[in-house]
Amino acid sequence: MTTKTKTAQSTPTRSAPTSDPVVIEDLIKVYNPHRPELAVRAVDGISFRVARGEALAIIGPSGCGKSTLLQILGCLDRPTSGRYVLEGKDVARLSEDELARVRNRHIGFVFQSFNLLPRMSALENVELPLLYGAQQETRERARAALAKVGLADRGHHMPNELSGGQRQRVAIARALVTEPSILLCDEPTGALDSRTGREVLELLGRLNAEGTTLIMVTHDLLIARSLGRAIALRDGRILMDGASAEVVAEFDRLHAESAQTEVAA
């Protein structure tokens, strides 16, 4: 099952380039490449594109390459070979300074553990990426980002004064404040209860409907099914890529068959 199925998305509310923001070609990541006895091929020759405004889930068992791929997509690591083109720029050709600027401008990160600085208020946490990027009107833009996630009245609160759901909303506001074209989410509801997790997913869904490209790594197949498209990885390779409902159903079936085989053995 390798059909490339893309779902229709809402028209973005702000003008944006029409080309695919993410293009991956024959991507390989090998850890310890110069020591064959220790070499680990975490990503093994994968290729795919992500359309602007698309919502993509990346699923697969532990050790399949999801986290490595997310780090490469977020410009936190470089591939061993292959091409990663982000908003028209070949990442391999960028210097460290250029890479940092591209990351700050085009990518927003949402982590499972929130990663808020404990001694800074919600507003200051949200403002931080703007300060790194030397942007203007940073405080006003941070307030607007908090308002967008429903926390306009929580800007002065410290992280330990907020609930888990509120902290994740602050993290989403921080990811959005630079108006990135891509939002990368690593298990964004993993540390939340089910009700709060649904609220966070609804917020991410609204942002995607407004035009933000969403790429989410998740173990939760229900969450994956709610996105338009899914890629299933196994042993660093793409096992399936297509409409999320179809990919998740087939992945679930294969997982059940594998479990039965292990029990029988």
Image (cartoon, grey):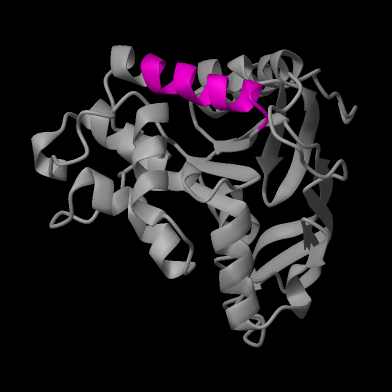
In the image, residue 121 lies at what x, y percent? 18, 49
Occupied quadrant, residue 25: bottom right
Left or right, residue 113 beside residue 46: left
In the image, residue 62 lies at what x, y percent? 50, 43
Which quadrant of the figure contains the C terminus?
top right
User: Which residue is at the front of the view, 76 or 260?
Assistant: 76
Question: Which region shows up in magenta?
Answer: 198-211
Was residue 208 drawn as part of the magenta stretch in this picture? yes
84 versus 121 height, above or below: below
In the image, residue 164 lies at what x, y percent? 22, 31
Residue extending furthest toward the bottom: 34
Was residue 214 drawn as part of the magenta stretch in this picture? no
Q: Visible in this render: residue 36?
A: yes
Left or right, residue 228 beside residue 4: left
255 versus 28 height, above or below: above
Residue extending furthest toward the left: 161
